[in-house]
């Protein structure tokens, strides 16, 4: 039996880099060719982190971004305590899709805490423009009471920091505590720390 303290789900349009983000966080590596592979349905992994002298095990679901899997994706974010909603920092259409997923989440999982994640920051360093502007996204995040992170799976920038922030928020919520400690989920099967089959204020280094 494997203990999982809480469920985290990644949502976003195809090819925004959800799988690459998880690969960087869980296995500390980046593969260029992952950017061209779509997740089918969903993939699961887990990762142990240390937050404020406590150990947390995150159960992470990487969901498919293709529209044909949207109905299936809704199954995976039920019961999630946190959702990382991703968009490509250079792609307006992926930001529009991120807003769609946020509306979906709010209508079904009202208590799920949302983290807006711009991926591919390394493209900005190569001269690409942020579309929409980072200020626009930061203001949007503030309006929906979400934290906003600007990340790069290629360099690893701000990815660990984002998951640590998620852990801190989980620990600070009284609803996640019991008399004996943390509420947790028990999953059957062998523990696996690698991928199976991912007021608003901009967080960047």
Image (spheres, rainbow, N blue to C red):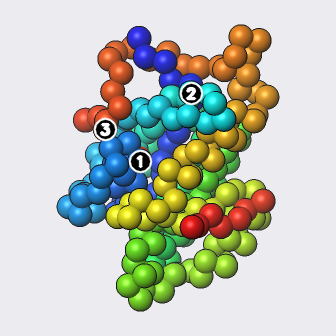
Tell me the residue that label 2 is attached to.
55
Question: Looking at the picture, how far across and down is residue 79, in whole percent?
Answer: 58, 31
Q: Report the residue at 34% width, 55% height from top.
A: 20
Q: Secondary structure at mark 1?
A: helix
Indicate whether 141 appears above or below 84.
below
Closer to the N terminus: mark 3 or mark 2? 2
Q: Report the residue at 66% width, 35% height from top.
A: 52
CA gap, disc 1 and disc 2: 16 Å
Left or right of 11: which side holds 170?
A: right
* Quarter-of-image position of residue 183: top right
Residue extending farthest to the left is 33
CA gap, disc 3 and disc 2: 20 Å
Query: Are there few (<14), some (14-19), or many (20+) residues within 10 Å of tag 1?
Result: many
Closer to the N terminus: mark 1 or mark 2? 1
Residue sitting nearer the eye, 47 or 54: 54
* Quarter-of-image position of residue 204: bottom right
Tell me the residue that label 3 is attached to.
195
Q: How many badges with numbers are in the image?
A: 3
Closer to the N terminus: mark 1 or mark 3? 1
Q: Secondary structure at mark 3?
A: loop
Q: Which mark is residue 25?
A: 1
Residue sitting nearer the eye, 176 or 15: 176
Q: Report the residue at 56% width, 52% height from top.
A: 162
């Amino acid at each position: 039996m494997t203990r999982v303290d809480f469920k985290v789900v990644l949502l976003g349009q195809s090819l925004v880099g959800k799988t690459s983000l998880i690969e960087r966080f869980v296995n500390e590596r980046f593969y260029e060719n992952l950017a061209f592979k779509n997740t089918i349905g969903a993939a699961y992994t887990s990762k142990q982190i240390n937050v404020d002298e406590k150990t947390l095990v995150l159960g992470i679901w990487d969901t498919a971004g293709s529209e044909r899997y949207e109905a299936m994706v809704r199954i995976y974010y039920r019961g999630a305590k946190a959702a990382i909603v991703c968009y490509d920092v250079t792609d307006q259409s992926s930001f529009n899709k991120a807003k769609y997923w946020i509306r979906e989440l709010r209508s079904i999982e009202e208590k799920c805490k949302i983290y807006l994640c711009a991926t591919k920051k390394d493209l900005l360093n190569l001269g690409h423009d942020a579309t929409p502007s980072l200020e626009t996204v930061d203001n949007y995040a503030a309006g929906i009471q979400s934290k906003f992170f600007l990340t790069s799976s290629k360099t690893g920038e701000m990815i660990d920091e984002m998951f640590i922030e998620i852990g801190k928020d989980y620990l600070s919520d009284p609803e996640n505590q019991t008399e004996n400690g943390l509420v947790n989920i028990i999953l059957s099967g062998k523990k696996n720390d690698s991928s199976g089959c991912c007021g608003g204020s901009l967080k960047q280094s």
